[in-house]
Amino acid sequence: MKPSVVLYKTLPDDLRTRLDAHFNVTAIDGLTPENLEKYADAFRSAEGILGAGGKVDASLLDKAPKLRAASTVSVGYDNFDVEALNQRGVILMHTPTVLTETVADTMMALVLASARRVVEVAERVKAGEWQRSIGPDWFGIDVHHKKLGILGMGRIGLALAQRAHFGFSMPILYNARKHHEEAEQRFDAQYCDLDTLLKESDFLCISLPLTEQTHHLIGRQQLAKMKPGAVLINAGRGPVIDEQALIAALKDGTLHAAGLDVFEQEPLPVDSELLKLPNVVALPHIGSATHETRYGMARDAVENLIAALTGTVDKNCVNPQVLR
Ligand SMILES: NC(=O)c1ccc[n+]([C@@H]2O[C@H](COP(=O)([O-])OP(=O)(O)OC[C@H]3O[C@@H](n4cnc5c(N)ncnc54)[C@H](O)[C@@H]3O)[C@@H](O)[C@H]2O)c1
Ligand SMILES: O=C(O)[C@H](O)CO
């Protein structure tokens, strides 16, 4: 008999067909409390779950006693209680690598848009304000040759460093849990502590995961240490930055601008102060959102679940210790 799985994200037709060939699939539209109750039988018999978003914690796992594998269509897995998965021997699979270059493109787009005020001035053109040659009130700041600080030199940080080094002649500074030899050798990236990164970066780009250690890592004190007129970019996870402290730093001119793909609350509430600030470029968590990359992530998530439940896991596993 095919293993039962709960699918909580819509897949492209060919990937759904592939999933159906391996599993008895119950498709639901998200891990809402209502769906957990409505599809209680499906969760009770599920050996696998596949989807994106929603909390997977002990209370959900208690409803799925047969669960052996969870496959997320994302690289970030801060919405999973990994400790609870480990205790129950559940493998967690994710989709690193396939999205790395696309997310680095998004970060570079945020760097350029924030520095050159692309969104703000384009809106002014649409509003009919371009009536004569523009003056300094439309100008931005240069990107090329400025210092780019990367907080979180992992897969995405490295791909961003490549773009900044070769494309924009930017010196690279970085902070991470350990030295990144490839970044140092290929892009002449210099490791430094967080304080130095804050003080010296013209552009501080965050590509960190959300963990207990990174939650509000950037708060009032850290923002105060940043170079006057610096630009802050975040495409890691929203709660890495204390959003109220960021709003204050943008309002009092400590920062030139911010380019944000992620927020403490998503979707960003429409009454957020951030949306009232002209020096904020706010994107709706589109880091990996291209047709090609979102398809690749869904494909990898399907293959990950097939490997975890019916084959051999040799990559993309968050907690390989469970397999031993
Ligand atoms: N905006 C988006 O759509 C989007 C898309 C993909 C990933 N992300 C986010 O980006 C994160 C990074 O992805 P990745 O593939 O580069 O991951 P990765 O694991 O390759 O890199 C993470 C880096 O962060 C560093 N790090 C972790 N904790 C740290 C700490 N306390 N202090 C300093 N450095 C620390 C690690 O050393 C590593 O260098 C994901 O976890 C996810 O949250 C966002
Ligand atoms: O972690 C990721 O893959 C992206 O943020 C999408 O959730």
Image: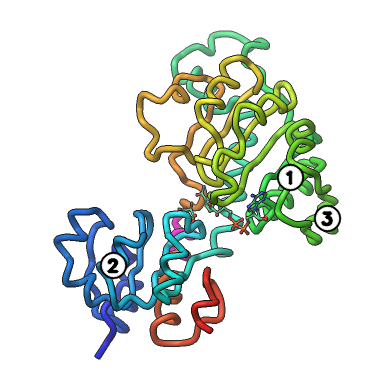
Q: Nearer the viewer, residue 313 or 141?
A: 313
Quadrant of residue 252 within the rendered picture = top right
Label 2 packing within 10 angstroms: few (<14), some (14-19), many (20+): some
- Going by the numbered disc 2, the residue's amino acid type is Asp
Alpha carbon of mark 2 to alpha carbon of mark 3: how far? 46 Å
Residue denoted by label 1: 164
Circles 3, 1 touching at the beta carbon (< 8 Å): no
Secondary structure of the residue carrying tag 1 is: helix
Of the residues shown, which amino acid type is indicated by label 1?
Answer: Ala
Residue at x 75%, y 57% (from the top left corner): 178
Left or right, residue 133 beside residue 50: right
Q: Which residue is mark 3?
A: 184
Residue segment shown in magenta: 291-296
* Above or below: residue 16 compared with residue 101: below
- Nearer to me, 314 or 295: 314
- Asked if residue 238 lies in the magenta stretch, the reply is no
- Label 2–label 3 contact, CB within 8 A: no
Q: Is residue 293 magenta?
A: yes
Mark 3, Cα crowd under 10 Å, few <14 / some 14-19 / many 20+, is some
Q: Position of residue 6 (x, y in %)?
A: 27, 70
Residue 16: x and y, percent? 31, 72
Disc number placed over residue 279 in the picture, else none: none
Please tell me which of labels 2 and 1 falls first in the chain.
2
| Mark 1 neighbour density, 10 Å: few (under 14) some (14–19) many (20 or more) | many
| Of the two numbered discs 2 and 3 in the rendering, the one whose residue sits closer to the viewer | 2
Q: Nearer the viewer, mark 2 or mark 1?
A: 2
Three-letter code, disc 3: Glu
Image coordinates of residue 282 in percent, x first then y, are 49, 33
The CA distance from mark 3 to mark 1 is 14 Å
Per the image, the residue denoted by label 2 is 62
Relative to the observer, which residue lies in front, 299 or 207? Answer: 207
Q: Earlier in the sequence, mark 2 or mark 3?
A: 2
